[in-house]
Amino acid sequence: MKKKRSLAILSAVVLTMALLAGCGGAKEQTQTGDQTPANQNENSADELDPLSMFPKLELPYEANADETIVEYEGGKLSAGEFETFLRVINFINPQQGSMISMADQEMIKVFAREYTATKILASRADEAVHAESVTQAEQTFEQIKGQYMSFFGEDAESKFAGFVEGHGVTKETIVEQMAIINDSITVLRNDLKDEDLKQIYDKMDVADRTLASVRHILISSETRTPEEALKIAQDVEGRLKNGEDFAQLAQEFSEDPGSKDNGGLYENAVVAQWVPEFKEAALTQPVGEVGPPVKTDYGYHIVKVESRQERTFDEMKDQLSGQALEAAYDSFSTDELDKLIVTYNIPEIKNAQAE
């Protein structure tokens, strides 16, 4: 079974983006929730309890802080240290925290295994790397703080201080844990070489390297026969070739909810994500021309490629670095990690004990 990498190689930037996503969902809830008199006063950001929006992590197990969760060559992971890590993850990424609170014993083992991997890799960082990791972690903490405070309304600074305390963490522990993650990533990244990334680039399918802006009009065959869908598509194609506006006809005829209101446009999209027939049209159809209807399982598409560009190695280097980083973690996990771990002592889940 392939090991999950939900925690161990998250960079500080990814963590911040995760928080943004979580905050967005909570903000939407405060704006679109019930407006009944009983909760009318609760819809003000100034009066919302931050901990009700982003609750403290409820661990699904119980363990003494000094218990050993994982023993590995050269060290151990205590229950107290592991709890701190999980609470920091919940603080940074509430959605991840929800997964932790509902985790079964096997998932807790996955989290413990990943954090052990992070600790082992971080221990290989030198002082210069660690100093930079701390600096990055402090900067990320300020970004996260700003995102939370934007939801707290008046007296946000005081609310944030209480919020941190309510989560059972401190600024110091948050920065410390993020620095450990940063250390582990840098240790892996320092082993990556440009020639390794270039090999990944050269092996990629051209569709994975190509970005295209494509307008299309979908005539669905779900509610009509394929022959009827094709006839409508051909009629729309004719109108387009007679000079009618593509965006206007897309809004009138297209049955693709993802692009209809945008004039049928998918802008600067990776071509590889599309179904084979549509992908082929996006890769080969002359730019600026309306092609004949393209048949897919969804129906018939009238396609116009507005732009197409195959990205260079330099343009994709950062993305390739991320892929190579995952491969490096896979290699460490497969070749080293399980050999270094001596034993697990994962606590039982409380609900499982009750049953």
Image (tube, grey):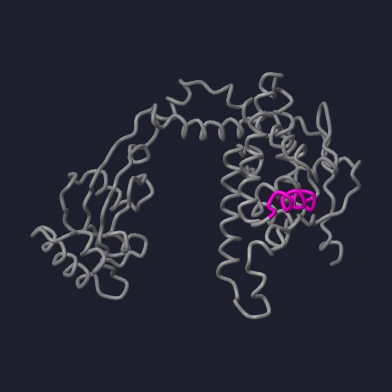
Residue 242 position by quadrant: bottom left
Residue shown at the point (67%, 34%) measured from the top left: 138
Residue 207 position by quadrant: top left
| Magenta region | 155-167
Residue 261 position by quadrant: bottom left
Question: Residue 323, how many percent across, how many down?
Answer: 51, 35
Quarter of the image where the N terminus is located: top right
User: Is 156 in the magenta?
Assistant: yes
Residue shown at the point (55%, 70%) measured from the top left: 32
Spot the residue most to the front. 154
Question: Residue 57, how many percent across, how many down?
Answer: 76, 55
Looking at the picture, does residue 268 appear above or below residue 58?
Answer: above
Looking at the picture, does residue 330 appear above or below residue 36?
Answer: above
Instruction: Looking at the picture, tell me which residue is in the foreground, 87 or 162.
Output: 162
Residue shown at the point (58%, 22%) measured from the top left: 191
Instruction: Looking at the picture, tell me which residue is in the foreground, 200 or 213.
Output: 213
Quarter of the image where the C terminus is located: bottom right
Instruction: Looking at the picture, tell me which residue is in the foreground, 79 or 229.
Output: 79
Question: Residue 35, how many percent across, how many down?
Answer: 60, 77
Residue shown at the point (69%, 32%) measured from the top left: 179
Question: Residue 209, how many percent across, how many down?
Answer: 36, 37
Looking at the picture, does residue 162 appear above or below residue 217?
Answer: above
Spot the residue most to the bottom. 37
Left or right, 322 with respect to 199, comes to: right
Left or right, 331 with respect to 100, comes to: left
User: Is 334 in the magenta?
Assistant: no
Left or right, 47 with respect to 253, comes to: right
The secondary structure making up most of the magenta span is helix
